[in-house]
């Protein structure tokens, strides 16, 4: 792994990109210019949590709104924990579908 624009360890910076969901994902994606690893995780955080937020809002219009929102909230926690753990362990882990979209955003290595 190489250095980062922000001067942090790549694994730490990548994990931070998940910390406040898409907010830190967007901030780190905009600031980080050097590390593909960090940019990928920041893009994946951004794409994943924006998609989940949109689903959460749209759930209001479906029967069983409370159940759907509860399931989406559980997904938020699962993706949040997995993203932080995988990033901090140095793994370029792609979430199904959303990881491919993140990869397109930052370009392939």
Image: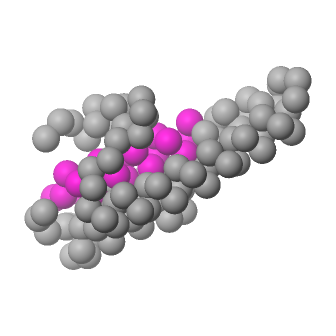
- The answer to whether 101 is drawn above or below residue 19 in the figure is above
48 sits to left or right of 55: left
Percent across and percent down for residue 2 are 11, 64
- Magenta residues span 32-51
40 sits to left or right of 56: left
Q: Identify the residue shown where x is 61% and y is 55%.
A: 77
Percent across and percent down for residue 85 are 41, 62
2 sits to left or right of 7: left
> Is residue 24 something one can see in this rendering?
no
Residue 104, quarter of the rendered image = top left
What secondary structure do most residues of the magenta stretch adopt? helix
Q: Is residue 50 magenta?
A: yes
Q: Identify the residue shown where x is 54% and y is 45%.
A: 49
Percent across and percent down for residue 80 are 53, 56
Colour logic: one colour
> Is residue 36 something one can see in this rendering?
yes
- The answer to whether 60 is drawn above or below residue 23 in the figure is above
Residue closer to the observer: 44 or 89: 89
Q: Identify the residue shown where x is 83% and y is 37%.
A: 67
Residue closer to the observer: 96 or 52: 96
Residue 61, quarter of the rendered image = top right
Q: Identify the residue shown where x is 57% and y is 51%.
A: 78
């Amino acid at each position: 792994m190489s250095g980062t624009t922000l001067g942090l360890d790549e694994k730490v910076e990548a994990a931070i990109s998940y910390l406040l969901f898409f907010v830190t994902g967007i901030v780190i994606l905009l600031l980080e210019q050097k590390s593909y690893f960090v940019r990928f995780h920041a893009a994946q955080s951004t794409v994943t949590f924006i998609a989940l937020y949109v689903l959460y809002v749209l759930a209001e219009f479906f029967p069983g709104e409370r159940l759907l929102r509860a399931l989406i909230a559980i997904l938020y926690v699962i993706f949040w924990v997995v993203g932080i753990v995988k990033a901090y362990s140095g793994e370029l882990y792609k979430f199904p579908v959303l990881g491919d979209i993140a990869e397109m955003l930052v370009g392939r290595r």
